[in-house]
Amino acid sequence: MLEIRSLSHQYNAATKLSFPDWNIRKGEQWLLLGESGSGKTTLLHMLTGIKKPTSGEVFINETNLYKLSNRALDQFRGIHIGLVFQQPHLIRSLTVKENLTIAQQFAGLKKDPGRIDEVLTELDIVQKINSYPGELSQGQLQRASIARAVLNKPSLLIADEPTSSLDNKNAKAVINLLLKLSVAGGSTLVVSTHDERVKEAFSKEYRL
């Protein structure tokens, strides 16, 4: 489902990051582990088409990501890849519902208010559907970010340090939600972290 081959990124003459080959099957749940500066974020950016590798290939559902045009890559990412960032990147001038509607449109999908209601209900924040990001708590913001990531039922769900700013209770709740939603949506899950609290929930690890 996800495969990387001979992947590397050259920042300058002195700094080159190389990554071991990695093959993930559909529906598997993995931790991406590594210390700060080990290249976790760089790798995530290459897995999602945000940053082009210096060499090597990334395949998602047998599609070679970097053989796509920029426009096709944007649409492919919107449909097949769900991203949960460390900090929620919601448009502050739009309501939660409007943020999620835009995620559907960017992927080239029709507006589906029923799907938005379904996801927000699952995440227990449907009561905040017409609220603006500035009106949400940190935990609600994180759930809204997760809602946007899983909205289009992506093949691949990627979370970058999703628990770093959360206390123990909320960190556990977020990881359990990601695991549950990946199973429910049939998504492959990759969680990048250096948070030791997360490790016990996963059996598969890719370490840098």
Image (cartoon, grey):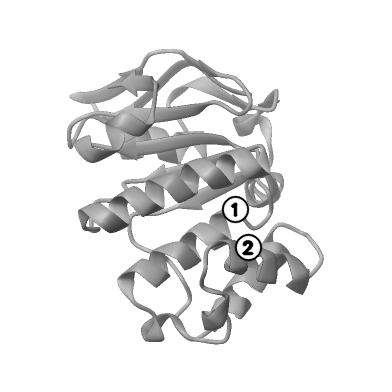
At x 33% / y 61%, what residue is drawn?
87
Q: Nearer the viewer, residue 53 or 103?
A: 103
Image position of 150 (left or right of 143)? right
User: What is the number of the mark on residue 205?
Assistant: none
Residue 124 spot, x, y in % from top left: 52, 68
Q: Quadrant of residue 96?
A: bottom right
In percent of width and height, residue 170 lies at: 30, 58
Q: Position of residue 77 (x, y in %)?
A: 62, 46
- Whether residue 145 is visible: yes
Mark 1 sits on what residue? 150
Provide residue 198's location: percent of width, then percent of height: 29, 38
Q: Which residue is depicted at the point 36% across and 21% down?
A: 205
| 165 relative to 35, above or below | below
Between residues 8 and 114, which one lies in front from this camera angle?
114
- Three-letter code for the amino acid on which mark 1 is drawn: Val
Total label count? 2
Q: Secondary structure at mark 2?
A: helix
Residue type (three-letter) at the residue carrying disc 2: Val
From the viewer's perspective, tell me whether residue 80 is left or right of residue 40.
Answer: right
Task: Kindly indicate whether the residue at mark 1 contacts the one at mark 2 (C-beta within 8 angstroms).
Answer: yes
User: Residue 156 lies in what quarter of the image?
Assistant: top right
Image: 157 above or below 35: below
- Name the residue rendered at 34%, 77% in the picture: 137
Residue nearest the observer in this picture, 64 or 148: 148
Nearer the camera: disc 2 or disc 1: 2
Secondary structure at numbered mark 1: helix
Rendered-image quadrant of the N terminus: top right
14 on left or right of 78: left
Residue 119, numbered label: 2
The numbered mark, 2 or 1, whose residue comes first in the sequence reads 2
